[in-house]
Amino acid sequence: MKMKLGIISRFLFHKILNEGCWIKLIDFNVKEERERYRHSTSHIMAHAVKELFPEAKLAIGPAIDDGFYYDFDLDRTLAPEDLIVIEKKMSEIIKQNHPFVRRVVPKKEAVDLFRDKGEGYKVELLQDIPDEEVSLYEEGGFIDLCRGPHLDSTGQVSAFKLLSVAGAYWRGNEKNKMLQRIYGTSFTKKEDLKQHLDFLEEVKKRDHRKLGKELDLFSTSDEIGAGLIIWHPNGALIRRTIEDFWLHEHYKADYKILCTPHIAKLNLWQKSGHLDFYRENMYSPMEIEGIDYELKPMNCPFHIHVYKTSLRSYKDLPVRYAELGTVYRYERSGVLHGLLRVRGFTQDDAHIFCREDQIENEILKVLDFTLFILKTFGFSHYDIYLSTQPEKFVGTPGNWERATNALKQALEAKGLAYAIDPGEGVFYGPKIDIKVKDSLNRPWQCSTIQVDFNNPERFDMSYRGSDGKEHRPIMIHRALMGSLERFFGILIEHYAGAFPVWLAPVQVEVLTIAERHAEFAKAFSDRLKSEGIKTELNSENEKIGYKIRNSTMRKVPYLIVIGDKEITENAIMVRKRSGENIGPYTAEEFIGILKEKITSKSQEF
Ligand SMILES: [Zn+2]
Ligand SMILES: [Zn+2]
């Protein structure tokens, strides 16, 4: 055997000599290798499905974050039991260790091949490929149209699991046929697969749609319209707590609060450039007295209007306007997802208008403010991205460079690590995006800080400089939580519905053991309420064990059970959500502890 080590690149498998044979190690930390491994598993799955259900038509089967999927057109609805059968067949194909063989053929030959096989989706895909030649991959008699790359053979897949079946429109378009998508994942090591499955179990437990229902926080309704969130009393109370905190902190940081309409004339969006650059996210206009109006996708033009209602001098700047502004953006029904992807949402929006010499300082302040707000919600790990000039842009390259440098300098001054996201800026300027890491270490896009050299130009904004001449202010758009809906969804999953005391919609629940304790319990609960503590009283004639279980399911932070002992000793024991008991406390002591937790917005309880 010739032993020649080729170029070992991070895109290739590393080869090592082991007991006289070449075996291939896949570096799972490298995205391309992970994807090659998982995409190869998706071929094996498609192969298994075709063997079991020859009438199934193949669509596409890419690798995705943490796994892969394959879409099939199959009349029979796949059930969880089917996945077990498919897994078994996959194991056989893996055991047979078929090599993946690549073949390059003229496109016409491939079209004929898939047409003969009745694979209409593949034919459609081929028709969109401009190349003269295409590549096919074959293993064990199963042929698929594919660019590759793949593993060398099916036997290299060692640990895999099929996870679920879901409906998916062909090409993601709801006008097309709904196909069946099988999701799965694969790993090089059994332990890694197990760890991942445990993680998925935890993710499922924390799903905000499930917890939203169980804790009665929010809902959506077909009757009202997809992607429109209805906040129930418990959810609305949490939202109000967040809004109060937001308002208070913005006053402290010298922002002025605005409230602006939900619709505006179409011409305004023409002027702002949204019609040219953002049309696909906007709804159709509505006509009022012969003039077209449009639901607002953003708040910016309104804040510009307020700025322009008075003459500004250099001494007036910076001007900071903030608004909890509700906007409406079109999202395809197929991508709507609980609170995370919706059609109407409230941004914690703000616009800062400043002089060029103030831009770095303003961005520094916004960064500080952002990190403070995120920390208050228990987020202290982030991924930060600086997005630069996209293909479609307005303004001059010089403007872009200056703005990008200002953002860079602010990040560096704060000592924050960041990655550059080339070409991902908004059409009007570069931006900083902050993704928070939740308690499962999942990243979520929340905060954004965007410099804008364009809108001040379009709206002819100005201020009188110290030189007596008119100058253009610079505009900074920023949202810290992003949208309240999405942020709430993230919080529910981050806390698994067990909110810290300051956010909890019910902070204390007072329970009675028997009817004779009701009067004392009512007085005690009223006392807490008068101190501003969100308290509920449950003096219903139920077994105490049942009442405790019920409150525990609602994840109420503190339970107080009132019985004979509490009344005679005038002291209470407190049962924490975790089941731990603390006390005894007098009413004053307990109120003191609670108030400290609430005002400090403690993450502990
Ligand atoms: Zn492939
Ligand atoms: Zn804006």
Image: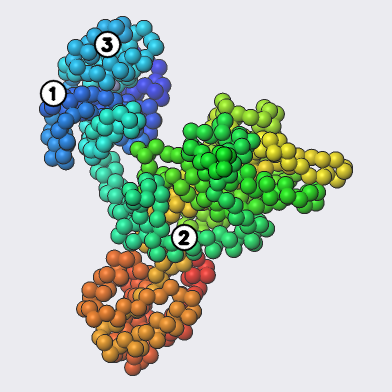
Q: Distance between the residues labelled 3 and 2?
A: 55 Å
Please name the amino acid that badge 1 sits on. Answer: Pro
Judged from this view, the residue extending furthest toward the front is 289
* Residue in front for this viewpoint, 605 or 345: 345
Name the quadrant of the N terminus: top left
Mark 2 nearby-residue class (10 Å; few <14, some 14–19, many ≥20): some
Residue at 46% across / 67% down in the picture? 502
Q: In terms of secondary structure, where does tag 2 sit?
A: helix
Residue 429 visible within the image = no
> Which residue matches tag 2?
239
Circles 1 and 2, Cβ within 8 Å, touching? The answer is: no
As drawn, the label of residue 54 is 1
Residue 188 x/y as whole percent? 27, 33
Q: How far apart are marks 1 and 2 (CA)?
A: 52 Å
- Choose the circle earlier in sequence order: 3 or 2: 3
Please name the amino acid that badge 3 sits on. Answer: Val
Residue 327 x/y as whole percent? 51, 47
Mark 1 nearby-residue class (10 Å; few <14, some 14–19, many ≥20): few
* Image-based side of 317 in relation to 89, left or right: right
Judged from this view, the residue extending furthest toward the bottom is 568
* Residue in front for this viewpoint, 261 or 234: 261
> Which residue matches tag 3?
111
